[in-house]
Amino acid sequence: MIETLAVALGDRSYPIHIGAGLLERLDLILPHIKQKKVVVVSNTTVAPLYLDKLQATLERGAISVLPVVLPDGEQFKTWETLNLVFDALLGARCERGTTLIALGGGVIGDMGGFAASCYQRGMPFIQVPTTLLSQVDSSVGGKTAINHPLGKNMIGAFYQPKLVLADISTLNTLPERELKAGLAEVIKYGLIRDLEFFVWLEANLEKLLARDPVSLSYAIHRSCANKAEVVAADEKETGERALLNLGHTFGHAIETGMGYGEWLHGEAVSAGTLIAAELSRQLGWLDSNAVERIERIFVRAGLPVFGPRLGSARYLELMSHDKKVQDGKLRLVLLKEIGRAIVSDQASDGQIGAAIEARCT
């Protein structure tokens, strides 16, 4: 069974298809390809698993495929790696109408989308996410980027795909650690705007960890529905979309401070969410029971609930480069209650530092 959502952005609207076996569904892909030539950007982990299957599907439609296989890992989300994509596009004389397909997790989706946004000032691209995290979050909404030594995702563009094809069959080969990391973004949707979903997650988390296809399909659909609604209302993150970054400002500091690739993105978001929850408690918005409830679900998901002890001064330094700094003030996503997040710049450095010290070991 296929479930389809739409990201409503006027003439740039696009579908998200969710289901099993979608890599073989030429009928879903073909309407979004302008030329009989595509470039598939993947990595050394995903390509051996799924590139041949996707290529065979495309070739059934008489579409020639140029594979570009990049090294795998957050530490390769750089200009140097991105240039490998441009080298391939130029070497094959790809035109502006050639479609780029990003086949992989969040790193490949971000880099493939950024390359597509830049090449000849914009070529069409399709997201084929193969991790839980990318299926519920990074493939939807048009955020594309690479990292800089001073900050994660600091160089990039808003650039929407033509199609998101989330084949849940690819989750069967996902390592356990990656599956758990993806759950951090799923839980996030419940925390920021969907209390009913959060309660469902509390009741069904073990089914998700066991990769029950019905439960996974529901969680992916519900997460994408939440994100699609937010993106349609605030594509460029000038308002409500910032709420999707719960735990991310602290989490990005962890990823940058520890060295890209040491902590998975979802692991850092999990620890960062607990820092945000602790700060929300200190500000008088959450009580201790709510913080403990949030901690319990992340613990059950097998995710870290304490960050590394980098020191509050180092966290604050790293966070000063965050994209949510406005007029020199750090704007954080905090929780008024479970199911309702806000963006606030009211916390002082002292309060932020105290929350960091309380939740880092």
Image: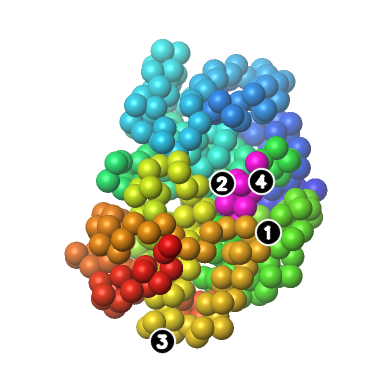
Nearer the observer, 127 or 124 = 127
Tell me whether circle 2 and circle 3 mark residues in contact (CB < 8 Å): no
Which label sits on residue 177? none
Nearer the observer, 311 or 331 = 311
Q: Is residue 221 visible?
A: no
Label 4: which residue? 176
Label 3: which residue? 284
The span from disc 4 to disc 1 (Cα, nearest Å) is 17 Å
Label 3 or label 1, whichever lies nearer to me, is: 3
Q: Taking 157 as reference, is 40 above or below it? A: above
Q: Residue 88 appears at what percent x and percent y?
A: 43, 18
Q: Specify the quadrant that holds the C terminus.
A: bottom left
Task: Specify the amino acid type for callout 4.
Answer: Glu
Tell me whether circle 2 and circle 1 mark residues in contact (CB < 8 Å): no
Label 1: which residue? 219
Q: Residue 355 appears at what percent x and percent y?
A: 37, 72
| Pointer 3 or 4: first along the chain | 4
Q: Residue at x 70, y 25 (%)?
A: 53
At mark 4, the secondary structure is: helix
| Pointer 2 or 3: first along the chain | 2
Residue bounds of the magenta highlight: 175-183
Q: How many other residues sit within 10 Å of disc 1, few (<14), some (14-19) or many (≥20)?
A: many
Q: Residue at x 44, y 84 (%)?
A: 285
Q: Residue 182 appears at what percent x and percent y?
A: 59, 52
Magenta span contains residue 227: no
Label 2: which residue? 134
Q: Residue at x 60, y 38 (%)?
A: 128
